[in-house]
Image (spheres, rainbow, N blue to C red):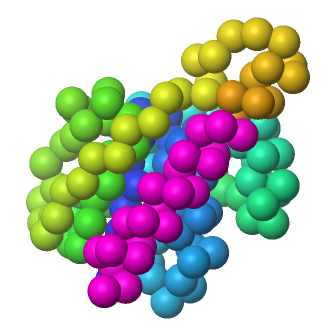
Amino acid sequence: MKILFLCTGNRCRSQMAEGFLKALDSSLTVCSAGTFPAKNVHPTAIEVMKERGIDISLNKPKNVSQYLDTSWDYVVTVCDKAKESCPFFLGGVKNRIHLGFDDPDAFGGTKTEILQEFRRVRDEIDMAVRTFYDTIIRR
């Protein structure tokens, strides 16, 4: 089964979702991409995922264009902007799902407050990915 998590920058949310699903089931083909990818994965996303024992430090943001000719069982958008600008996949998509999360990178505040926001969003993504896996993928 092939799953693509899609976000705007592929810097935080989609990277975390990819990491969680890969940790749940290594037999799946799981990728993430962005409609306008950033230059790197957000360092705080890397930090909060390490707290959960998942290393995304070697991940790189990718442009969704490299996946458009691929067939996917699921394309999961994790931000509203990606949902609105989701491109047409020439390879085909069997199922499209939207799981919207706040962008922790857009949150302002002290370093401690920003870290708390990343953890909050990480935990929401974790729960949503587990539910997606348990109710749709593993059934």
Where residue 54 appears, as percent x and y from the top left, is 75, 64
Where residue 81 appears, as percent x and y from the top left, is 32, 27
Main secondary structure type of the part rendered in magenta: helix
Where residue 103 appears, as percent x and y from the top left, is 53, 28
Q: Which residue is located at x 63 percent, y 46 percent?
A: 122
Span of residues in magenta:
119-139
Quadrant (top left, top right, bottom left, bottom right) of the C terminus: bottom left
User: Does 119 sit above or below residue 136?
Assistant: above
27 sits to left or right of 42: left
**Residue 133, magenta (yes or no):** yes
Give the mark count: 0
User: Does 122 sit above or below residue 134?
Assistant: above
**Residue 138, magenta (yes or no):** yes
Where residue 40 appears, as percent x and y from the top left, is 67, 39
Q: Which residue is located at x 39 percent, y 43 percent?
A: 78
Q: Is residue 130 visible?
A: yes
Res 39 quadrant in image: top right
